[in-house]
Amino acid sequence: MIDESPLLSVTGAGHRYGDRFGCRDVSFDLWPGEVLAVVGESGSGKSTLLGMLAQRLSVDEGSIRYRMAAASEDRTREQLADLSSLTERDVRRLWRTEWGFVHQNPADGLRMHVSAGGNIGEPLMANGLRHFGTIRSQAEEWLARVEIPVSRIDDAPATFSGGMRQRLQIARNLVFGPRLVFMDEPTSGLDVSVQARLLDLIRSLVADLGLSVVIVTHDLAVARLISHRTLVMKDGAVIESGLTDRVLDDPQAAYTQLLVSSILQG
């Protein structure tokens, strides 16, 4: 890939709900600049996996390690840190400086009654930027970048369409320059034409910014369009993984074959 070592390394990871596992024995590496799609039907364990990766659910077995950014420009000082060993303060810092999360419902990732510019500006202020003119200028730049009219900068997301809300949420998550972004069904619930426009935007931004992305989706068309590799999950386990084109064009597991054939027949 783009770098010599992974940004995220998952080894035998699992999360337990009471006496059962929501997902178990999941292993993969995510490389800098790579987009990984996690696909499967409802209940397959993909959302549980995303929750573990994002440190919103505990890692009850195995490990998830992340390559923490070095304090200096010396990349050789970066080290893979076990996320379970981090303090709450460490995790909050990651969310402020290195990680983004795009929710399925934009209302979960936006302050709906704060202006669009305010939503984009808040992460910049959290990272120490204080000059109002600079913050507003960057907000305007990002509104244009996600195809929202700059004239809407003082409007609240509550007045926006679903597609505009999702694009604003993406801007809020990317404005501070994260290294890793988690996306949970970002196109779900949108009209087909709006979905296509949003996916084109995500694909171009990911390429331009060199982001690493883990995207959870039930839509194989989404995986095909924007991901380099795909994990297929069923009953809490990864049953197939590989380059996205290979997984979708020549699926080996019967379940993956069923998913692909259902899309083709639909």
Image (cartoon, rainbow, N blue to C red):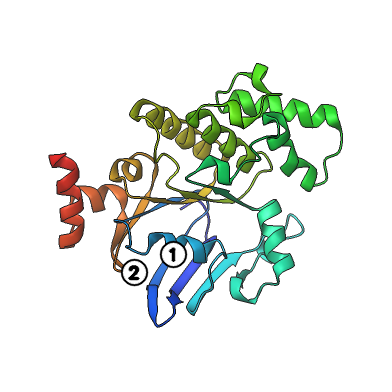
The three-letter code of the residue at mark 2 reads: Gly
Q: Where's residue 243, x and y in %?
A: 31, 53
**Residue 107 - label:** none
Considering only vertical position in the picture, is 266 above or below 84? above
Using residue 248 as the reference point, say whether residue 1 is left or right of it. right
Which quarter of the picture shows residue 194? top left
Residue beneath the point at 51% across and 75% down: 59
Q: Where's residue 139, x and y in %?
A: 70, 29
* Precedes in sequence: disc 2 or disc 1: 1
From the image, tell me which residue sits under label 1.
48
Residue beneath the point at 50% across and 43% down: 105
Considering only vertical position in the picture, is 117 above or below 177? above
Using residue 222 as the reference point, say whether residue 6 is left or right of it. right
Considering only vertical position in the picture, is 238 above or below 147? below
What's the distance in space between the residues labelled 2 and 1, CA to CA?
8 Å
Considering only vertical position in the picture, is 91 above or below 170? below
Total marks drawn? 2
Q: Where's residue 159, x and y in %?
A: 59, 26
From the image, tell me which residue sits under label 2.
236
Can residue 144 be seen here? The reply is: yes
Q: Are marks 2 and 1 in contact (CB under 8 Å)?
A: yes
Q: Where's residue 261, x and y in %?
A: 14, 47
The three-letter code of the residue at mark 1 reads: Thr
Residue beneath the point at 66% across and 44% down: 177
Which quarter of the picture shows residue 167? top right
Identify the residue at the far right of this view: 131
Using residue 199 as the reference point, say whether residue 176 is left or right of it. right
